[in-house]
Structure formats: structure tokens, C-alpha cells
Image: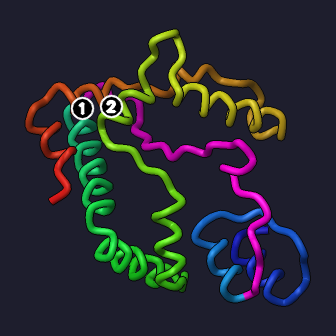
């Protein structure tokens, strides 16, 4: 079932257990009295977000990719430094998509979802001993997806994850300053 169907099933007492993700978990906690039994963090799983560019575009336009990353990193820097304003914006964004959650749930979203600045991203992506922390996370996801039949084979993370564009942000003084600014 999709998340909306799961919310409906839980709300109408037609199911007892569900696998969900934010912001939907907040909706069922508040509206159906559901309780989170285990999160990815408690289960030892990390599900990282990923920014994706088409390979041909990234190779032909590396500076555009770096500029996009700088804007993205600055947005998170600003949101973490201005949580009340960011929460108001997120609440409005969710409402426009038909998702209604409380301010307490929005705060929980910020408190439980780790985000990383440019320096942290570079450190987690550094391949000192052939694999980075990010490589390990995506490798674990790939194994899981292979075991569930979602992937026919386990891809090599180095074939689809690169820190090249983060390094371009770091190397460019203007982009680096922009990415690290919270104003």
C-alpha cells in the first residue's frame, strides 16, 4: 500500500502494523494514536538522501552542479540557523501537498533528521581506505535492495557516488563561502 492508504487503514483500525516514513509517521501518531516501534536509527539502518544529476549533464556542466550544491548546502545551513522560520515554510509546503502536521511534529522532523554541512559532507565522502562512510551506507542499501529483488545485482557505489562536485564547491572561495553562510 501507499502511504495514504496505510494512513487510512491505521485510522480505520484495518491494520495493526505499518512501515512508514516522515512526514506520514507524524500524521498517524497524531490522528490515529499510532506509536513508532522502531526507526531506522534504532534498527541500525541509515537511509541517506541523495542529490542526483544525469552523468552527461554533470560532466558537461560541472560548475552548474557545484552551484546547485552550494545553494542546497546554504539552504540547510539557513534552515538549521533559523528553525522557526524554516518550520513555518515546511508546514506551508506540506499543507500545499495535502499533508497537515502539527508544529510539534515539524520540530520533531528537525530534531530527528541529521543534515550535514559542506565540511561534514566532504569528510563522510572521503575515500581514504578505498571506501567512505557514504559508500558504506549505499552499499548496505544496495544489499538490502538485492535481497528484496528490487535490484538484480549489487552495483559498485563508486560507479554512482562521487565527491567531485562537493570538492568543486570547497575549492571555489565564492561557492564555499556561499555554501557555509546561514544568512
Residue 58, label in figure: 2
Q: Quadrant of residue 34?
A: bottom right
Q: Position of residue 144 (x, y in %)?
A: 76, 36
Crowdedness of circle 2 by 10 Å Cα count: few (<14), some, many (20+)? some
Secondary structure character of the magenta stretch overall: loop
Left/right of residue 19 with respect to residue 74 in the rendered view:
right
Viewer-proximal residue among 102 and 93: 102
Left/right of residue 173 with respect to residue 159 in the rendered view:
left
Asked if marks 2 and 1 touch (Cβ < 8 Å), the reply is yes
Tag 2's secondary structure? helix
Whole-number angstrom distance, CA of label 2 to CA of label 1: 5 Å
Whether residue 36 is in magenta: the answer is yes
- Say which quadrant the C terminus sits in: bottom left
Left/right of residue 103 with respect to residue 89 in the rendered view:
right
Residue drawn at (69%, 43%), measured in percent from left and top? 45
Q: Quadrant of residue 83?
A: bottom left
Give, as a single range, the part of the protein colored magenta. 32-60
Viewer-proximal residue among 2 and 77: 77
Residue 61, label in figure: 1
Q: Is residue 164 above or below residue 29?
A: above
Amino acid at each position: 500500500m501507499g502511504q495514504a492508504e496505510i494512513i487510512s487503514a491505521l485510522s480505520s483500525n484495518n491494520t495493526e502494523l505499518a512501515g512508514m516514513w516522515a512526514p506520514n509517521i507524524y500524521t498517524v501518531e497524531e490522528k490515529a494514536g499510532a506509536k513508532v516501534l522502531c526507526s531506522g536509527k534504532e534498527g541500525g539502518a541509515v537511509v541517506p538522501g541523495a542529490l542526483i544529476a544525469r552523468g552527461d549533464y554533470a560532466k558537461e556542466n560541472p560548475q552548474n552542479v557545484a552551484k546547485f550544491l552550494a545553494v542546497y548546502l546554504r539552504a540547510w545551513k539557513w534552515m538549521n540557523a533559523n528553525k522557526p522560520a524554516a518550520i513555518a515554510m515546511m508546514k506551508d509546503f506540506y499543507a500545499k501537498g495535502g499533508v497537515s502536521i502539527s508544529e510539534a511534529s515539524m520540530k520533531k522532523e528537525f530534531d530527528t533528521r541529521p543534515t550535514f554541512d559542506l565540511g561534514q559532507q566532504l569528510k563522510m565522502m572521503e575515500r581514504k581506505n578505498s571506501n567512505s562512510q557514504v559508500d558504506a551506507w549505499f552499499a548496505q542499501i544496495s544489499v538490502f535492495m538485492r535481497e528484496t529483488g528490487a535490484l538484480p545485482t549489487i552495483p559498485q557505489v563508486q560507479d554512482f557516488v562521487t565527491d567531485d562536485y562537493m570538492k568543486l564547491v570547497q575549492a571555489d572561495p565564492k561557492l564555499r563561502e556561499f555554501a557555509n553562510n546561514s544568512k
